[in-house]
Amino acid sequence: MVQVDPIKAFSDNYIWALKKEDKVWVVDPGQAEPVFDYLEQTATTLAGILITHHHWDHTNGVEALLQTFKNIPVYGPENSPFEGISHKLNESDEITVADTKFKIISTPGHTLDHICYMNDAFCFTGDTLFSAGCGRLFEGDPEMMWHSLEKFSSYSDETKIYCTHEYTVANLNFAKTVEPENKILKKHLEEVQTLVAQNIPSLPTNFALERAINPFLRTSLPNTLKHLPKHLIQEQSNNWQKFAALRAWKDEF
């Protein structure tokens, strides 16, 4: 059974480590030093790297890691501007790391090259889907991101979600403003505040919880935009337009 451990990086990043016996694969190593520390502490060897998108805080550690662990595979999106990828991936490709099979889904929106690594047990969503939130639209548009998020709808409630940032408290504070009557959301915010105060990760989350608390997965529900500020009201005949209004609200929150 593969073990997934968080490696903390920068102020709020997680580099996820997939550990199988004495081999480790890391997801989005924005820094090399925390990975080297983890490998030393666990007496393991780096066997490969998975990249979700090109942003520096997900890729800056790759070069240093490759200087020590030469010729290991670096998986990532084929259309990525990041040049350190050796094994380029597209929608519906499959890879096996740590004796675990992952399907690739293309999730443009946060960036145009964003991909996620998915299976029924757990998935690595980078900056596309956060707990109680989603990524800011730096390169894509709202319709694109909405369709990317829709791809998660086929995954079971039990599937664990490993995203790359500890944004949960801030996201829940926004979600509480969107749905102040949501009791599950309020309870989870209290639980997460306790965890974060003890320096314990709020992640992973799972789709059952996210479908109950994440406004960006709930935009098609009748009351999600009930409290939308008046200046953001626009045509909302399509679900992606409702998502666009919600994302604009979050951007100025």
Image: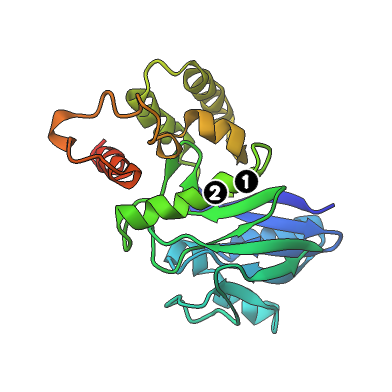
Tag 2 residue: 152
Q: Where is residue 214 in the image (x, y as percent from the top left)?
A: 46, 34
- Determine whether, in the image, residue 79 is placed left or right of residue 144: right
Which quadrant: the C terminus? top left
Numbered label attached to residue 155:
1
Gap in angstroms between the C-alphas marked 2 and 1 = 6 Å
In the depicted structure, whether residue 149 falls above or below residue 212: below
Rate crowding at label 2 as few (under 14), some (14 to 19) or many (20 or more) other CA atoms within 10 Å.
some
Asked if labels 1 and 2 touch by Cβ distance under 8 angstroms, the answer is: yes
Q: Position of residue 38 (x, y in %)?
A: 70, 57
Label 1 is placed on what type of residue? Tyr
Q: Position of residue 13 (x, y in %)?
A: 51, 51
Asked which colour scheme the image uses, the reply is rainbow
Identify the residue at horizontal 36%, vertical 26% (top origin).
222
Q: Quadrant of the rendered structure where residue 81 is?
A: bottom left
Q: Position of residue 33 (x, y in %)?
A: 60, 63
- Determine whether, in the image, residue 81 is placed left or right of residue 226: right
Q: In front here: 183 or 162? A: 183
In the depicted structure, whether residue 187 falls above or below residue 120: above
Q: How many marks?
A: 2
Confirm whether residue 11 shows in the render.
no
Label 2 is placed on what type of residue? Phe
In the rendered image, the residue lying farthest to the left is 231
